[in-house]
Image (cartoon, helix red, strand yellow):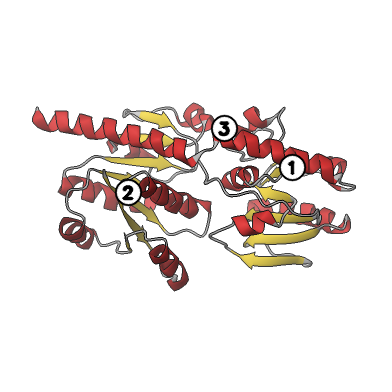
Amino acid sequence: MRIIITTRFYRNGQTTHVTDLCTELMRQGHQVLLIMTDLHDPTYSRWLRKARISFITTSNQAKAVRYCSKWFAGPHIIHNHSSHTMALAKTLSSQLHIPTITTVHYLDFELMRSLPSQDAVILISDEMEEVLGTFGTPTYVVENGVPLPLLHRKAWRQQALFLAQVTPDKEDNFRRMTECLLSWDWKVHSAGNWKHKGVVQYGWVNRIYPLLAQSDLVLGTGRAVREAMIAGKPAWVLGTYSDGLVTSSNVEHLRKTNFSGRSSKQRFEASDAALHLKNPVPSILQALGSWGRRYAEQHFSIEDMTRKLIAIYEECISKCSRDTVR
């Protein structure tokens, strides 16, 4: 199958999700062209070439059509991941006579009114389905999957990693958690835009697993939690809200909101964190990480996610072919 993936370049987990999907589609034998607009980062462009992901960066609809017609002839479907590239995807769909689908990554997805024009819509959590409903077009829930890294066992270092892009509504929770961790003698690192005195800050990191391997606790939401679990690390759901540690007793509940913190909608409380993190017991947190790895292997496989998406692609292509015959 020949698949066009469209998205805008973001310095967050959504971009990582898209490139991981491209890689897995190729691994499963499909051909992929990534159209990533607003990509003005030479380092990231080099990484895409090293990963052998074919990509173009134009947002000009006519140029994209010409490129696809000449160099990616005969595509079967377009999978869009951003409201900023919906118009581009729709033009390509019309000009190339192929179906287009969109994955909605956030509840506040812009251009929600345009989703009924898609051949299918993919939502990433049960919460989205409950809140957004359907769109007069086939709608599916497909949770995000993450690659399975090799486990690297290491000695306990009492090191925490904030894995997040922080917005103003998250800052108070992040500040208060950071101050607690530092006062409890944790080493605190940040992969993303969170900055605070005493925190080692790396900026946005595309390949996060080496940093995860050196961590004993991961704080964030959404994809960050899934990546922590698949890496065998305990995860604390912290964003605008704080849902606390992910455990076997709450994981099903927290999954429904994609580990966003919206399950409880509670602010961070130092007393809650102190129960687990003020005088941490390494064996308990390491056991929690091992459980998380086993759970993630069963439920967050990128291979399974991609197979589900391929089945949706095939259904849309088949329907488009039937409609064309009529």
Q: Inspect the image, locate mark 1, and give the three-letter code of the amino acid beneath it.
A: Arg
**Front residue of 7 and 71:** 71
Q: In which quadrant of the rendered view does residue 41 lie?
A: bottom left
| Left or right: where 143 falls relative to 3 | right
The residue carrying pointer 1 sits among few (fewer than 14), some (14 to 19) or many (20 or more) residues within 10 Å by Cα, namely some
Of labels 3 and 2, the one closer to you: 3
**Residue at figure coordinates x 35%, y 39% from the top left:** 113
Of labels 3 and 1, the one closer to you: 3
Task: Identify residue for label 2.
Answer: 86
The N terminus: image quadrant: top left
Marked residue nearer the N-terminal end (3 or 2): 2
CA distance separating discs 3 and 2: 33 Å
Image location of residue 183, percent across then percent down: 88, 57
Task: Identify residue for label 1.
Answer: 267
Q: Inspect the image, locate mark 2, and give the three-letter code of the amino acid beneath it.
A: Met
**Residue at figure coordinates x 50%, y 27% from the top left:** 130
Disc 2 secondary structure class: helix
**Front residue of 206 and 156:** 156
Disc 1 secondary structure class: loop
CA distance separating discs 1 and 2: 35 Å
The C terminus: image quadrant: top left
Disc 3 secondary structure class: helix
Asked whether residue 165 appears in the rendered view, the answer is no
Task: Identify residue for label 3.
Answer: 298
Image location of residue 13, percent across then percent down: 53, 52
Marked residue nearer the N-terminal end (1 or 2): 2
